[in-house]
Image: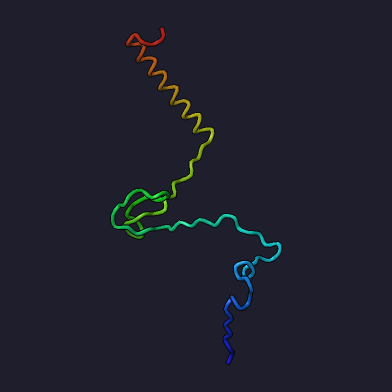
């Protein structure tokens, strides 16, 4: 039989708050704790917006699901296509203004 000794912290150290839990040399202190968000928070009715969550009925039922919108991807082709769309809109706007006698002559 192995004894199970128990010693109160106050008997092991004179000042437990400063001596009992001292980090070893060279061990860094974590400055920021990792923030964990639950993937699903069950809720039968919408109870207001929650930052980082979307209310919906999905895989685990009705509730707040962690909102993971797709990353926005921008490339040169998309920018050029958007530029062309804006050009076409300006041409149509100028034509409409010209027909009404409002645009540049």
Name the image quarter holding the N terminus: bottom right
Residue at the far right: name it: 25
Residue 5, given in percent of the width and then of the height, sits at 58, 85
Q: From the viewer's perspective, is residue 4 above or below residue 105?
A: below
What residue do we see at 50% from left, 31% from top?
79
Q: From the viewer's perspective, is residue 73 above or below residue 102?
A: below
Residue 74, given in percent of the width and then of the height, sits at 51, 37
Name the image quarter holding the C terminus: top left
Count of picture labels = 0
Residue 81, given in percent of the width and then of the height, sits at 47, 29
| Residue 43 as seen in the image, left or right of residue 4 | left
What residue do we see at 42% from left, 22% from top?
88
Residue at the far top: name it: 105
What residue do we see at 59% from left, 55% from top?
31
What residue do we see at 32% from left, 55% from top?
57
Residue at the far left: name it: 45
- Residue 60 picture quarter: bottom left
| Residue 3 as seen in the image, left or right of residue 44 | right
């Amino acid at each position: 039989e192995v004894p199970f000794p128990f010693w109160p912290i106050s008997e092991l150290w004179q000042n437990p708050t400063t001596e009992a839990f001292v980090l070893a040399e060279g061990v860094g202190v974590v400055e920021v704790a990792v923030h964990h968000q639950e993937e699903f928070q069950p809720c039968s009715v919408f109870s207001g917006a929650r930052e980082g969550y979307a209310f919906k009925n999905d895989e685990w039922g009705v509730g707040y699901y962690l909102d993971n919108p797709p990353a926005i991807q921008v490339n040169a082709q998309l920018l050029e296509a958007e530029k062309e769309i804006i050009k076409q809109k300006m041409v149509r706007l100028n034509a409409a203004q010209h027909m009404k006698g409002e645009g540049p002559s």
